[in-house]
Image (tube, rainbow, N blue to C red):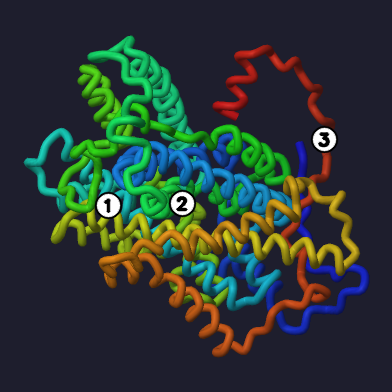
Amino acid sequence: MAALRSHTYAPGPGADEPKSSGYAEEKAAVDTGAGDSAPLHRKLKSRHLQMIAIGGIIGPGLLVGSGNALAKAGPGGILISFSLVGIIVFFVMQSLGELATLIPVSGSFVDYAGRFVDPAAAFALGWAYWYLWVTVLANEYTAISLVVMYWTDTVPQWAWILVFWVVFGACSMLGVLAYGEVEFWLALVKVISISVFFVVATVISAGGIGPGPIGFKYWHDPGAFADGINGVAKTFVIAGTLYAGAEMIGITAGEAGNPRKTVPRAIRQVFWRILIFYVGILLPYTDSRLLKSGSKTASSPLTIALKDANIAPAAHLINGLIVVSVISAGNSSLYVASRTMLYLARTNKAPAFLGRVDARGVPWTALLASNVFAGISFLSVSTNAGEVYQALITLSGVATFLVWGTIEVVHIRFRRAMAVQGQSVAALPFRALWYPYGAYACLAANIFLVLFQGYTCFLTPWSPKDFVINYILLPIFALFWIGYKLWHKTEVVRLADMDIYTGRRDMIDDEPTAPKTSSGGFLAKVKRVVVG
């Protein structure tokens, strides 16, 4: 058994005492609560963290949104956009893994932004990240209502949204360990089901099932690209939303029992699980059943592919899988949104009542507030559901790039502070691969995508609506940062003053280590990769 020792701030060689960061007080407020609030519980295990991260990726963005991407860009277009964003995710996870393994605190990279950059950066990033996840949650409410209507349209869409709004809210009130177990098994079902679909899809493409071989015929007719480079640009935000959730490991690290062991393992295994869930060879991008801006109902491309192959029962099973996956993704969205709001409330960056936590470690006020805001999904009832879904996807995708870019800024500042304070990189329990090249390249890529993803709105004809949807978050993010900075008169943290110590939990071996057993062969290795 191993105990964990927490560190508080102790300046390194050549470092002065911080002038007025107030971080120690903020850290105490987050960890212990205030008034009648209770602290968060640290009960998540390695397998929970691994499945929470991969389960966040296998959600409506993949199972429904991928059809939207296919319709916009074609199979070649989404192969490019999803691959590039997948590479960005790899480097974001490397940066975050280094920080979260060393300093696994509540608030994660939002906390790091205030300590390593500027308190104003934490304010802007925290609200952007909270907004990202309530927008993703609204996506999920819209997606699940669309997908359930594959079976019947007797029940109106608003009723389905209301039903799942209640279900998500009830599930989110479980304690953190119960949440981890539920999410683990739901995510495991998703991983196994998607893996089985890949096998079936290969057989369908080869002609073993269905009317005949498909191969790459849809790459020739109607073609690999739906709208050339314009289609690729439009799907970057969809890919960003699809991969949003991998960074969730940073948030869960604050409630992990042994982050020095669990976080690195989760980071490494998530890398192997970040695959291109590629369905472009089974469907033409011109298929009218894919989710588009004029859609009132829609099917997942996975469901369509199985139905076309005359495997109707399997199509229903896939649709059921999508319902399960959206419930799982909804749990994750509310979990992250509530923990982010909790941190903001307990560090005086949001109303204090949102920082309340019950005796089971559930931040119930933040959960309720986040779920209520996600009620914007009801907008899809009064207009084309597909159009609302696309707008929400774009907003959450842009927010994702802002968050990932800020994580890289935080990581770069952290490494520079280590050098100034005379700290050795060799002492880090987990080191980011290919630093600094990967971190700087990832930062540049996120800046490029934030600006590039909406350039098509400037083409003829000019689209004011698309311009607002694609770029409105940029001035809002800047306004939050600058406004907080001017109001509270904050300063950029000097490298020598930076607190890179508080919140560390070092391992102390207080019991003999159990002897290592045999690896157990191929099946045991598969189990470790899939289950943890």
Q: Dot 3 corresponds to which residue?
A: 511
Residue 27, picture quadrant? bottom right
The quarter of the picture where the N terminus appears is top right
Residue density around tag 2, few if under 14, some if 14–19, many if 20 or more, within 10 Å: many
Q: Nearer the viewer, mark 2 or mark 3?
A: 2
Q: At label 1, which amino acid type do we have?
A: Trp
* 254 lies left or right of 504: left
Q: At label 3, which amino acid type do we have?
A: Glu
Question: With respect to residue 290, does 343 lie above or below?
Answer: below
Residue appearing at x 48%, y 63% in the figure: 450
Q: Dot 1 corresponds to which residue?
A: 165
Disc ID at residue 240: 2
The one nearer the camera, 108 or 379, is 379
Quote the CA–CA distance across marks 3 and 1: 46 Å
Q: Nearer the viewer, mark 3 or mark 1?
A: 1
Residue density around tag 1, few if under 14, some if 14–19, many if 20 or more, within 10 Å: many
